Image: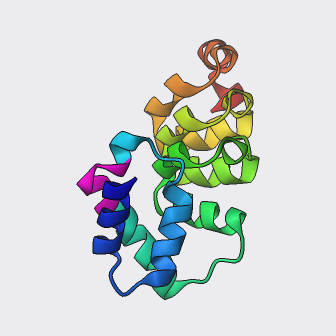
Amino acid sequence: HRGFEHLLMEQLQGFQGAFDLLRHFLQYASRDLQDDRDFIQRAADIAKHFATTDSWHDELDLVLKAVRLDGLLLEFAPQKWQNHQGVVLEAVRQNGFALQFASEDLKADKLIVHHAYQQNRDSLEFASAELRRTSKRQPCEIL
């Protein structure tokens, strides 16, 4: 996608490592996001941060660093990471609303939902229906 590549090149001039990192991560973003200048700027800032302050060794490391910086980036992670308890736990600790991007199995995980709720009480709306029902009957069971 030519516009996407151009925006990335413009934002990451002089940061080849960050450019490669961002291309890898954003391959999962929708076309609309790939053309969204504000989104590209935000993503470029994150990639620059990784490229200049930390090294990353594998995809898990990259995803963990991303969700620790902004839990809502879980939305753009491949499905396998949205179903990874460690990744989702880090995401909801940073932003409880990241629970909405977790797999259905993890939306039913008491530990994940507990941490999402602790970060933002309104995130409970994204928990599984069963956990929402349980929290109404026995709030201490989950929260």
- Residue 37 sits inside the magenta stretch: yes
Percent across and percent down for residue 125 are 50, 23
In the rendered view, would you say 110 is above or below 54?
A: above
Residue drawn at (62%, 37%) of the image: 102
Residue 27 as seen in the image, left or right of residue 137: left
**Bounds of the magenta segment:** 34-41
Magenta-drawn stretch, dominant element (helix, strand or loop): helix
Q: Depth check: give the residue in front, 108 or 122.
A: 108
* Residue farthest along the left direction in this orientation: 37
- Quarter holding residue 43: bottom left
- Residue 78 sits inside the magenta stretch: no
Residue drawn at (40%, 53%) of the image: 1
Visible residue check, residue 68: no
Q: Depth check: give the residue in front, 94 or 30.
A: 30
Visible residue check, residue 72: yes
Percent across and percent down for residue 9 are 34, 72
Residue 8 as seen in the image, left or right of residue 49: left
Residue drawn at (64%, 46%) of the image: 78
Residue 67 as seen in the image, left or right of residue 85: left
Percent across and percent down for residue 119 are 50, 46
Percent across and percent down for residue 51 are 50, 82
* Residue farthest along the front direction in this orientation: 2
Q: Depth check: give the residue in front, 116 or 62.
A: 62
In the rendered view, would you say 16 is above or below 116?
A: below
